[in-house]
Image (cartoon, helix red, strand yellow):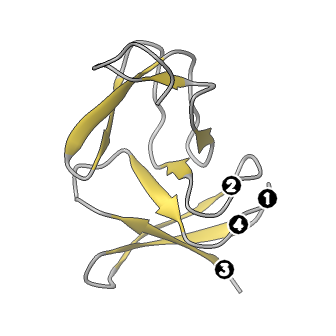
Amino acid sequence: MDKRALRMAASDDVATVIDAVSAGEKVCVRTKSGEVACMLTAREDIPRFHKICLIERDAGDTVTKYGQIIGRVTSPIGRGSYVHIHNIESIKTGVGA
């Protein structure tokens, strides 16, 4: 069975995983209305309720969640990778998001 993730807005670069995900597992990303937004393979283990990257991001790119910019990429993030304080920083505070 595929793992689940939720994308809050169509412009989001990340989704929140609903189930803990292990590297190599398939993740079904759905919209708030329940439609399938995309399927992807996790590149890393991701804890429950943390972020998974939906598109490739380079250092310096912004990260969008809830339709709002939540941070800036500090090191490249691949599609299906874990997005957290080790690879993004808060734009507002300059610390890990």
How packed is label 1: few (under 14 Cα within 10 Å), some, or many (20 or more)?
Answer: few
> Sequence order check: which comes first, mark 2 or mark 1?
1
Viewed as shown, does residue 28 lie left or right of 11? Answer: right
The secondary structure type at the circle numbered 4 is: loop
Q: Amino acid at mark 3?
A: Asp
Which of label 3 and label 4 is nearer to you?
Answer: 4
Q: Residue at x 36, y 20 (%)?
A: 61
The residue pinned by badge 1 equals 24
Counting labels gives 4
Identify the disc placed on residue 20: 4
Q: Residue at x 57, y 24 (%)?
A: 87
> Sequence order check: which comes first, mark 3 or mark 4?
3
Quarter of the image holding residue 19? bottom right
Q: Amino acid at mark 4?
A: Ala
The residue pinned by badge 2 equals 42
Query: Does 87 appear above or below 45?
Result: above
Q: CA distance from mark 2 to mark 1?
A: 5 Å
The residue pinned by badge 3 equals 2
Q: CA distance from mark 2 to mark 3?
A: 11 Å
Q: State yes or no: discs 2 and 3 in contact (Cβ < 8 Å).
A: no
> Sequence order check: which comes first, mark 3 or mark 1?
3
Q: Amino acid at mark 2?
A: Ala
